[in-house]
Structure formats: C-alpha cells, structure tokens
Amino acid sequence: MYRSLTYVVDVTQMREPTFLILTALAGGPRHGYGIIQEVAQLSATRVKLLPGTLYTALDRLTAQALVEPDREEVVDGRLRRYYRLTPAGLDALTTETARLRELATAAETRLRALRPRTA
C-alpha cells in the first residue's frame, strides 16, 4: 500500500526575507531603501530584496500588524515612509529567533557527533 507523506508546517514559521525585514526593523524605524540595505548587510549580501518584493512584504506585514508606518518625510522631492516593528512584530521575531536557535542547536549537536574525536 502506498501512502503519501504529509509535512505539517507551523503557519507561524517565517520565510527568510520576512525574518530579515523584521530583524532590520528591530534596530529602529527604517525607510524602504534602508531596509533593503540592512537586509543585505544582515545576510552578507546573500539576500537582495527588490523594491517590489519589499513593498509587497511590508504591505502584508502591515496587514498582519507586525509592522506599521512610523513617519513620512520628503527628501529631494520624494516621499520617504519609515516603518517600525509593532509589539506583535517583536513577539513574532522573538518566537522565530528561538525556533531557529533550537534548530541550529540540534544540528550542531548532530554535527559534533559526526566529527572524529581527537586524543
């Protein structure tokens, strides 16, 4: 008898770009380009957010009440909107950080067991 495997993923598990956006905002309010730069720095340039991707994510995170607009200012004739982490966003980031730490600890434990012991 063939049985398909079903993987259950906790809906609170974040995708990496979301985690990095929230982490960037944990350092204080930032405007879009500032978030893009901070995410690139946090990920050692491995994650490069495009503006369309970022603003779609910010709209979703705002709808989920994880981030909110902080203030707006005009710079060189262009509107610059700053975003900040909400208390719910801080809670979500804290929970995800703990989840990732647990996974990393489990992986490190298993990797140590594979390494040859030195005398």
Image (cartoon, rainbow, N blue to C red):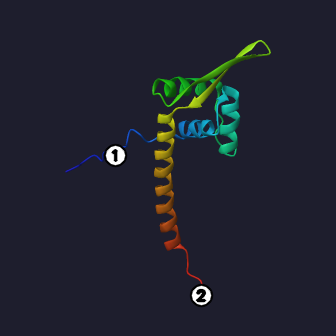
Can you identify the residue that label 1 sits on? 7
Question: From the viewer's perspective, is residue 90 above or below residue 53?
Answer: below
Give how far across and how far down residue 51 sits, in percent: 65, 25
Dot 2 or dot 1: first in sequence order is 1
Seen from the viewer's position, the closer of residues 25 and 57 is: 25
Q: SS of the residue at dot 2?
A: loop
* Amino acid at the residue labelled 1: Tyr
State the quadrant of the C terminus: bottom right
**Which residue is situated farthest in the bottom direction here?**
119
Mark carried by residue 119: 2
Q: What's the residue at 37%, 43% (across, down)?
A: 9
Seen from the viewer's position, the closer of residues 90 and 13 is: 90
Give how far across and how far down residue 20 sits, in percent: 59, 40
**Which residue is situated farthest in the left direction here?**
1
Q: SS of the residue at dot 1?
A: loop
Q: What's the residue at 77%, 12% (across, down)?
A: 77
